[in-house]
Amino acid sequence: MDVVYNFLADYVNVLLWDYFLTYGLLFAGLYFSIRFGFPQITRMWEAFKQVFGKLFNKDASQEGSMSSFQALATAIAAQVGTGNVAGVATAILGGGPGAIFWMWVSAFLGMGTIFNEAILAQVYRMRDRNKGDLVGGPAFYLSKGVGSNALAKFFSVSLIVALGFIGNMVQSNSIASAVTTAFAIPEWVTGFLVALAAILIFAGGMKRIASFAEFVVPIMALVYIVSSLVILFLFRDNVVPALKMIFVGAFSPQAAIGGIAGASVRAAVQKGVARGLFSNEAGMGSTPHAHAVAHVDHPVQQGLAAMVGVFIDTVVVCSATALIILVTESYMDPALKGAQVTQAAFSIAFGGSGSVLLAICLTFFAFTTIIGWYYFGESNIKYLFGTKGVLPYQILVAIFIFLGALQEVDIVWMLADTFNALMGIPNLFGLFFLSNQVKAVLEDYDRCKLEGRIFYDYDVK
């Protein structure tokens, strides 16, 4: 087992993440941003109006679909996870404060990629034959658009393993660790309760998942952001120096800063870009499953909404984590790693109640990710096996959730990284292959706006 772990850690994941995906996703974001006229600049105000202007429109969805906001909430449920807490701290420790600047750059470019993904997911969606629910995602535009069933199946299997099974073990373990630390509840009890709560939501299908995400995600994000703003207020004298550290560190080699053992510009770029891309999942092929089922008048409208998801995940939530770590100087303790650094920041600000507050936030972050990732996996189960595969998949996911809570197994975490990377490869190919079609859909949207109507002739089978 050690041989497999070392092979994955030293060769496979280094090749896939440090080189192919980090630079591949960054190039993709730049290319798509230019190709579509930098929608993250020219259309961002329209994107916010698309999301928040219809926030209270309860009749925005139709049978077998989600409203645009519900689809976005489901996507954000998957995007905002433990990585926003632990991953940001890891980026700072490995790449210095300057890594946060490059995290912002990756988010900016990632908006161009996810804009592309969401539009394609809308164009190539279909209805399952039994319930009539909409379903879509990269497997559907790889098979129907690119014309490659092999790539579609490779993507589906990779995603089901990466997110539905292994990824949800990771999230469950994060919940169990946080709850045990804060409340001394045994891991198996937490694992059982999380698995039970999850399967009750799974059993309700798309409607229950959408309602859960729509209700929980805004509250979850608001609690964390408000807590972070309180910390920033308490340490307001350190905010400007923290921002200076970020911008200076992005372009100048850093000497050792407390617990940070010296960070070069290369390390800042690599850690920051990787953190941003892994967190917002732009280009990885996960969130299009949620955006595919949104009920909108035109695919571009959901492309706009998808960009807001990246903004909230990386520019808002990840930045909040970064700033509270820097202003409280919780990174100064070399014994702390990952989420412990963020937990220390909360404890410095709020005392003993700080660790409890963060444990609650982590629990909701991880649990909503479980729901989002389950749904993405279900879409691919339907692609591979139809609706008859959904119930066995639900049972297997619940088992993996329970097992993940029992103990942390390094090889499981390493496999999660591997399969996450593998699913991104065919998705990127599909995005480049079909970019001309996305350009045509975007031109159709602009033409419809000039004519005073927003309408797209969907061919949903």
Image (cartoon, rainbow, N blue to C red):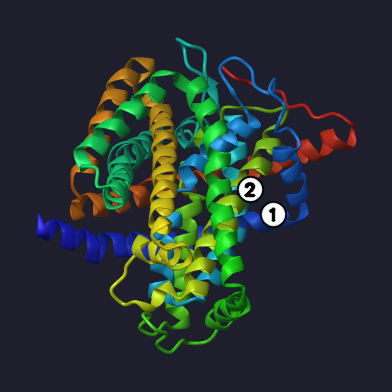
Spot occupied by residue 139 in the image (x, y as percentages of width and height):
44, 34
Q: Is residue 162 visible?
A: yes
Between marks 1 and 2, how big is the CA–CA gap?
7 Å
Q: Quadrant of the C terminus?
A: top right
Report which residue position mark 1 lands on: 40
- Whichever of callouts 1 and 2 sits on the residue coming sooner in the sequence is 1
Residue 191 image-quadrant placement: top left
**Do the residues bearing badges 1 and 2 touch, measured as CB atoms within 8 Å?**
yes
Q: Nearer the viewer, residue 417 or 314?
A: 314
Circle 1 sits in a helix, a strand or a loop, which is it? Answer: helix
The residue at 81%/40% (across/down) is 446
Work out whether residue 285 can be spotted: no
Residue 154 appears left or right of 26:
left
Q: Residues within 10 Å of mark 1 (few under 14, many from 20)?
A: many
Q: Identify the mark at residue 461; answer none if there is no mark.
A: none
Identify the amino acid type marked 2.
Met
Image-based side of 221 in relation to 192, left or right: right
- The residue drawn where x is 34% and y is 77% is 333
Rendered location of residue 455, percent (x, y): 77, 26
* Crowdedness near tag 2: few (<14), some (14–19) or many (≥20) residues, C-alpha within 10 Å: many
Q: In the displayed image of the protein, which residue is found farthest to the bottom?
A: 255
* Image quarter of residue 5: bottom left
Q: Residue furthest right?
A: 451
Specify the quadrant of the image occupied by residue 15: bottom left
Q: Position of residue 46 (x, y in %)?
A: 77, 45
Q: Which residue shows up at 31% across the image and 65% down it?
A: 14
Indicate whether 27 appears above or below 197: below
Q: Amino acid at mark 1?
A: Gln
Which quadrant holds the N terminus?
bottom left
Disc 2, SS: helix
Nearer the observer, 106 or 223 = 223
Judging by the rendered image, the residue that carries numbered circle 2 is: 307
